[in-house]
Amino acid sequence: MGKKKKGGDSKGKKAHKNKPTSKKYKFYTIEGTSVKRKQHCPRCGPGVFLADRKDRKHCGKCGYTEFVGKADKVAVK
């Protein structure tokens, strides 16, 4: 039989890290009687939203990217 190692070298269960939940209320806005939603990913479907970056819209799940043209940038400002 082998000797037991002393210290932190033993393998065991790792501590569980609690992740914060998604803040889904940020993806919807209510204006009067209508509800506006952020854009969904066309590949992943409803429930997966595109992140708004400076020059593109990006899906973090599948990697889908839509680039915003110069004409769109002028209209946004």
Image (cartoon, rainbow, N blue to C red):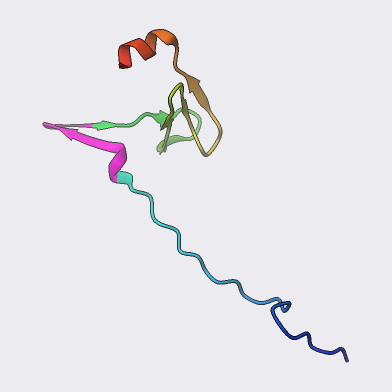
- Residue that extends furthest to the left in the rendered view of this protein: 32
Q: Position of residue 15 (x, y in %)?
A: 55, 72
The image shows residue 25, relative to residue 11, as above or below, that is: above
Residue at the spot x=72%, y=79% of the render? 10
Residue at the spot x=23%, y=35% of the render? 29
The image shows residue 73, relative to residue 37, as above or below, that is: above
Q: Position of residue 52 (x, y in %)?
A: 41, 29
The residue range painted magenta reads 25-35
Q: In the image, 50: left or right of 13?
A: left
Relative depth, front residue between 55 and 13: 55
Q: In the image, 24: left or right of 9?
A: left
Residue 11 occupies quadrant = bottom right
The image shows residue 66, relative to residue 3, as above or below, that is: above
- Residue that extends furthest to the right in the rendered view of this protein: 1
Q: In the image, 69: left or right of 29?
A: right
- Residue that extends furthest to the front in the rendered view of this protein: 7
Residue at the spot x=55%, y=35% of the render? 62
Q: Position of residue 39 (x, y in %)?
A: 37, 29
